[in-house]
Amino acid sequence: MELSNKRIERRDFFAQRQQVLRTWHTGKDVEDFELGVTYQRAIPQAKRFSTALRKADLAGKTLLQPRAGVALVPEHIKLLTFLEDSCDVLPTTIDAYTRLNRYEEAASGIARSEEAGTSLLNGFPAVNHGLAGCRRVVEALSKPVQVRHGTPDARLLAEITLAAGFTAYEGGGISYNVPYAKKVPLEQSIRHWQYCDRLVGLFEEEGLRIDREPFGPLSGTLVPPFVSHCVALIEGLLALEQGAKCLTLGYGQAGNLMQDVAAIRSLRELAHEYFQQSGHEDYQLNTVFHQWMGGFPTNESGAHAVICWGAAMAAMSGATKVIVKTPHEASGVPTKEANKQGLDATTQILNMVRDQHPPSGPALEREVELIKREVRAVMAKVFELGKGDVAVGAVRAFEAGVMDIPFAPAACNAGKLLPVRDNEGAVRIFEPGRVPLPDDVLAYHRERIEERARAENRAPSFQMVVDDIYAISKSMLIGRPR
Ligand code: 5AD
């Protein structure tokens, strides 16, 4: 079957499902799809992710979510119950072996962790723990739990965790491939994620809402809003086509106030525009703001400051949810105490900012319009390349360098687009590569970069880009020469 943005036929899905469930022995526990449906049906509303999102949206509130995952079930439960009181919705962050479908190595990581009495994996190996282990986790908690990972082929993980009662699933065929993998063909990861979305669609057909969240921040390194918006829109369209109905589109903080507020607003507006243009009416749309995803200061006070600026932007932008960093970000997997510190700092800021009017005015409108024009230019080319099919268009757009994610490792990514900050720290386009932005838009980016170059008394160069990449970890937003 050729790649296309068409709903996978039931028969084809269940044929593929048999293969998927055979890839690791825990797959057999979820063979009967109806058991997962029955289990999901019994989950109280208070533990449904989509319900929490909807309530937050109506109340104009931003939900708080940490990242967290360790190797063993009892320790993972301890970790999440410790964090539960300090946040609104919970994660289960999956370990790196599971993300690469290396279940043998995950198994040995579990065994070694048991021996050592501490987690030797960087997340929770949900596939190895299987249906029973995952259900123990979900049942021990009173808040909704999402699977968060970075897996190009997440089919078995989806089967096990959704049957186990997780009510939200992160990832997408582009966003969990291009920034995460080197050699996985894009067409393959898109197909594998169409499967995950179809699975979610089957739950939706039973009246069971599962939130689907494309991974917004991508490489987390100076990603211009239009780049991540295009990925979010495409993955949203692909998910809707397979029957998903609750989408949470993401964006990673860039650091400039106007740009970050404009990014969340434009993301929401563009999503409605593109989804409705494609004939989708019946869906729930949410947004998620990720606190700074690039390099963090090692000094914990500095890290707290970065966290708080992100919290302020999340609140001002009106995102439905914020994903929180910790003061241990620069050093690795955080302790549960550090994790709670990030949550508490974020809560303080959210509470202080919540009732204030967000920034508005011509500067904001200009930024919103700029992002929209950039997205429309790229999306038009994606549809053109795919002759109307967004799945085909996405693959061809990456081949052609029309879609280009800065600093992403995938071989299918051109890596020709170079971003750099302007004199106020907004991320601008230094080198567009083959991304088809309108001439006047490119001229505007050049002007803003020239303004910075004059202020710094140096020519725009790759050195400037490098300086920006390290700036925040060195306590600055803009990588100025010292
Ligand atoms: N627990 C907590 N945070 C984690 N991250 C990755 N794995 C874990 C884990 N097991 C965080 C990283 C980074 C982000 C991408 O996810 O620290 O902030």
Image (cartoon, rainbow, N blue to C red):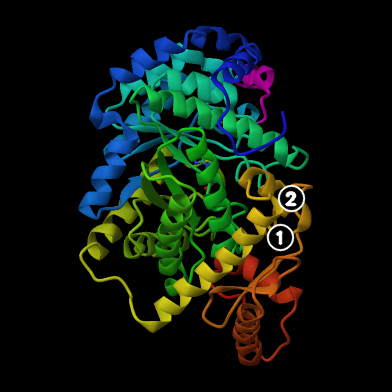
- Taking the image as shown, residue 141 lies to the left or right of residue 20, namely left
Q: CA distance from mark 2 to mark 1?
A: 8 Å
Front-lying residue, 289 or 113? 289
Front-lying residue, 392 or 295? 392
Q: Secondary structure at mark 2?
A: helix
Image quadrant where one finds the N terminus = top right
Q: Residues within 10 Å of mark 1 (few under 14, many from 20)?
A: many
- Taking the image as shown, residue 415 lies to the left or right of residue 352, namely right
Q: Quadrant of residue 227?
A: bottom right
- Taking the image as shown, residue 348 lies to the left or right of residue 376, namely left
Label 1 is placed on what type of residue? Val
Residue position for label 2 = 396
Q: Quadrant of residue 122?
A: top right
Residue 115 showing in the rendered view: no
Q: Which residues are magenta?
A: 100-109
Residue 303 showing in the rendered view: yes
